[in-house]
Amino acid sequence: MNSENLIRRYVITGSRRLSNYWWASVVFLGAIGFLFTGLSSYFGQNLLPFLQVQNITFFPQGLVMSFYGILGLLLSIYLWLTIIWNVGGGFNEFNKKAGAIRIFRWGFPGKTRCIDISYSLKEVEAIKVDFKQGVNPQRTLYLRVKGKREIPLSQIGQPLTVEEVEKQAAELAKFLQVSVEGL
């Protein structure tokens, strides 16, 4: 058995998804629009040529629009920082050669910026599949470890099809030589 068959690594995307770039940009542009409208009403002149604010008084409309603009900018900064820091991104590594499982994720800056969990392959009891149907369906793979809780292996975002989840669970269970639960 060659070394390629002994190590499996699954990359987890995290917050660097197209939808997050889209929403961070939309919120930023909307916030700038609200803020410039509020400031234009305060100064009594159009700060942007396409804004016509002569009918907007500063109190209360302009003040509220400025407030919404500032809140939108703060939300946009938060979204962009999570994208830059790649919060939630990382990998799941299953290494038969070293006899270890490593789950790595990036978090927010601070003491827990890097979340790095390692387990021995001997501690793995099963791969669990959890299906939740409804308006917001969730299909999640869990790694069940002896005497410990279930560790999620799936990434957040667009839910996979039932077939894809079953295929991933079967491949991983076969690789780790453990059972699959929840199917």
Image (tube, rainbow, N blue to C red):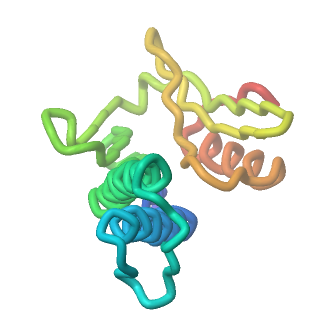
The answer to whether 173 appears left or right of 64 in the picture is: right
The residue depicted at 71 percent of the width and 50 percent of the height is: 159
Is residue 94 depicted above or below 41 in this figure?
above
Q: Quadrant of the C terminus?
A: top right
The residue depicted at 48 percent of the width and 16 percent of the height is: 149
From the top left corner, tell me how far across and down residue 11 is, in percent: 45, 59
Report the number of discs.
0
Can residue 142 be seen here? The reply is yes
Find the residue positioned furthest to the top. 147
The answer to whether 133 appears left or right of 105 in the picture is: right
Q: Which quarter of the figure has residue 134? A: top right
The answer to whether 59 appears left or right of 169 in the picture is: left
The residue depicted at 33 percent of the width and 65 percent of the height is: 39
Is residue 14 depicted above or below 32 in this figure?
above
Find the residue positioned furthest to the bottom. 49
The foreground one among 140 and 99 is 140
Find the residue positioned furthest to the left. 111
The residue depicted at 46 percent of the width and 47 percent of the height is: 60
Can residue 82 be seen here? The reply is no
Q: Which quarter of the figure has residue 133? A: top right
From the top left corner, tell me how far across and down residue 176 is, in percent: 54, 40
The foreground one among 119 and 58 is 58
From the top left corner, tell me how far across and down residue 10 is, in percent: 48, 57
The foreground one among 140 and 135 is 135
Is residue 104 depicted above or below 57 in this figure?
above
From the top left corner, tell me how far across and down residue 177 is, in percent: 59, 37
